[in-house]
Amino acid sequence: MFSTWAILVAVEEGSISLDSPIGQSGCTLAHLLSHAGGYGFDGTGPISAPGRRRIYSNTGIELAAAAVEAATGIAFATYVDEAIFQPLNLTGAVMHGSPAHGVHAALDDVIRFVEEISRPTLLSVETVASATSVQFRELAGIVPGVGRFQPCPWGFGVEIHGHKHPHWMGAKNSARAFGHFGGAGTMFWVDPTFDVALIALTDRPFDLWAPDALRLWPELSDAVLVEPNPGSSITV
């Protein structure tokens, strides 16, 4: 998500376009940011034509970041720092390694970032609305660790809840809710219908957290949404 937001800053600055061709024939930046570029989870070669199905892909995000680096002449980690971390005063955030999963940040940093997504200052309202809306609407695909969905809606960098069931977000989340979870047990969702967000950060290997979290996150999400004052900030 941090990488995607930095890439969208580059789009708004005119350094690159969502229609810029990247990778295999027919693949654009928009395909890569919405996991529709035809690349597998990892590995350099495509496994499908672009725009055919939703395949969650670290490779796709890495290709997108490399394209921004080439277009701007700025190392991508530096670009993220200057475009996102510094303007939002995310003093505990740093990118180590892959743009697809290499950001380390404290809870306060992620709260500020989620607030930025909800009430943008670095990107236009129109860009954020597009990023958090479904791209390539009818694509089916698999949410890793959760299941296969038809369709499997995704925006730019964020998964859209839509009508997926069962799902890692709650049953009470609206179809407009969007978010992301990662292999270390981190997750957040934002539900614009309720103006509520939920964040969880851990650093546990996937196999240790996934069986419990993918069962408990929906329960936690639903509990948050039925709180008398769900907009309040609570740290557990």
Image: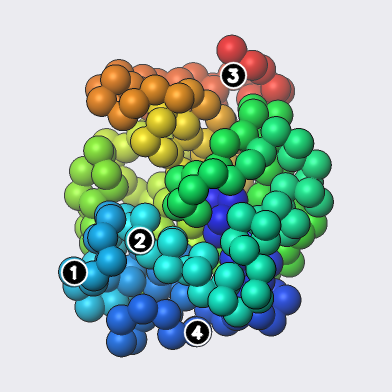
Instruction: Quadrant for the C terminus, please.
Output: top right
As shown in the figure, which amino acid type bears the numbered disc 3?
Glu
Q: Kindly identify the residue that appears in the image at 80 percent across and 42 percent down.
A: 89
Q: Is residue 76 above or below residue 191?
A: below
In the image, is 236 to the left or to the right of 57?
right
Which of disc 1 and disc 4 is earlier in sequence?
4
Asked if residue 124 can be seen in this view, the reply is yes
In the image, is 40 to the left or to the right of 87?
left
Which of disc 3 and disc 4 is earlier in sequence?
4
Asked if residue 214 can be seen in this view, the reply is no
Q: Which residue is mark 1?
A: 47
Count of all numbered marks drawn on residues in the image:
4
Element at label 4: loop
Q: Is residue 194 above or below residue 33?
A: above
Which of disc 4 and disc 2 is earlier in sequence?
4
Q: Which residue is mark 4?
A: 20
Residue 2 percent across, percent down from the top left: 59, 51
Q: Residues within 10 Å of mark 4 (few under 14, many from 20)?
A: some
In the image, is 76 to the left or to the right of 222?
right
Q: Which residue is mark 2?
A: 59
Q: Which residue is mark 3?
A: 227
